Image (cartoon, rainbow, N blue to C red):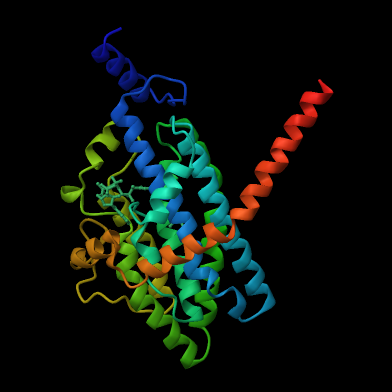
Amino acid sequence: MDEAAKIEEFENRIASGEKIEPKDWMPEKYRKQLVRMMSQHAHSEVVGMLPEGNWITRAPSLRRKMALLAKVQDEAGHGLYIYCGAETLGLASRQELVGELLAGTAKYSNIFNYPTLSWADIGVIGWLVDGAAIVNQTALAKCSYGPYSRAMIRICKEENFHKKQGFEICVTLSRGTEKQKAMLQDAVDRWWPKTLMMFGPHDSDSPHSGALLKWGVKQFSNDELRQRWIDMTVPQALQMGLTLPDPDLKYNEQTEHWEIGPINWEEFYQVINGNGPCNRERLAARNKAFDDGAWVREAALAYAEKQRSKQKEAA
Ligand code: FAQ
């Protein structure tokens, strides 16, 4: 079959809802888009441990500490599933991708480049950030690439717990003392505008959306998912007695959607290109963890080698 016929067959398979599996033929552009997106996603999960990890020792009770510890550990697991999924796309090893993260040449979600200043930030990250991640990832669970879609199904289940633990912290603070309410409002004021950016640039400025939508990697556009999250989240904020930091926020009775004011894209591009408030700190922490973990990787390789020799001897 020539290339055009292969592409036609590939696109027909996607149109009929079939999953593309690692050994199936795929256009090189599809493979590259997936490596790009999955590696950015895996890096986000791994770097995403840092802002919340910072609060494990300061969680206000043993129950909160256990829940936060489990959540942060889940994020590490999510990173590993997605790196595994990316490895099915013909990479020699995930080290190629991790190397780019450590060198500062890879992207990861804008949202993890901001500091967590109070305990309320932990609640708000669970509620807003994990809530946004669920909206995005529930759609990705139906994506055309089998390993990515299957990873998303499990990840979404875990993210639901994360969102609930965050929401519960927020509800508790919203019913607390005046100081606690103010702490919650302050965290919402800081995280709301950044979470809106997580869905990526507006559709008109999103260079990758066309190909990703055509090939069923994305099921919905950046703006569609952002709107879905806004419509879900604004009523929750109002129910907790919170205000959202957007003077233009209003409900449109005709469209039945909440409308927002302009997003600060200048800030977004600064952050995703390495110039956010915590980018340097995040990369330094990942590099330190990688260096400190060298002995673990060596020990694991030595153990695997020993097992292989034992099996060879026994055979
Ligand atoms: N941050 O053409 P588009 C989580 C970049 S996981 C940084 O629209 P695309 C769980 C984009 O890469 C959060 N960069 O791109 C958790 C591209 O740059 P490039 C991560 C961004 O791919 C919770 C350029 O802008 N989730 O939160 C962002 O079609 C709590 C042009 O953009 C995923 O990665 C951004 N927000 O759409 C963990 C989900 N947005 O590559 C711990 C999978 C865009 O040309 C604690 N990814 N860019 O240099 C996706 O769904 C998509 O890749 C989008 C972007 C929607 C993120």
Q: Height in image: 275 above or below 255? A: below
Q: Can residue 314 be seen in this view?
A: yes
At which x and y percent is residue 222?
28, 50
Residue drawn at 29 percent across, 59 percent down: 272
Q: Quadrant of residue 2?
A: top left
Quadrant for the N terminus, please. top left
Residue drawn at 28 percent across, 30 percent down: 29
| Residue in the foreground of this view, choosing between 196 and 296 | 296
> What is the number of callouts on the image?
0
Q: Height in image: 124 above or below 155? A: below
Quadrant for the C terminus, please. top right
Q: Can residue 152 be seen in this view?
A: no
User: Is residue 313 shown left or right of residue 77?
Assistant: right
At which x and y percent is residue 310?
80, 31
At which x and y percent is residue 112?
40, 64
Residue drawn at 25 percent across, 63 percent down: 268
Q: Residue furthest top?
A: 1
Q: In which quarter of the image is residue 278?
A: bottom left
At which x and y percent is residue 236?
42, 69
Q: Height in image: 284 above or below 307? A: below
Q: Height in image: 283 above or below 296? A: below
Residue drawn at 61 percent across, 81 percent down: 60
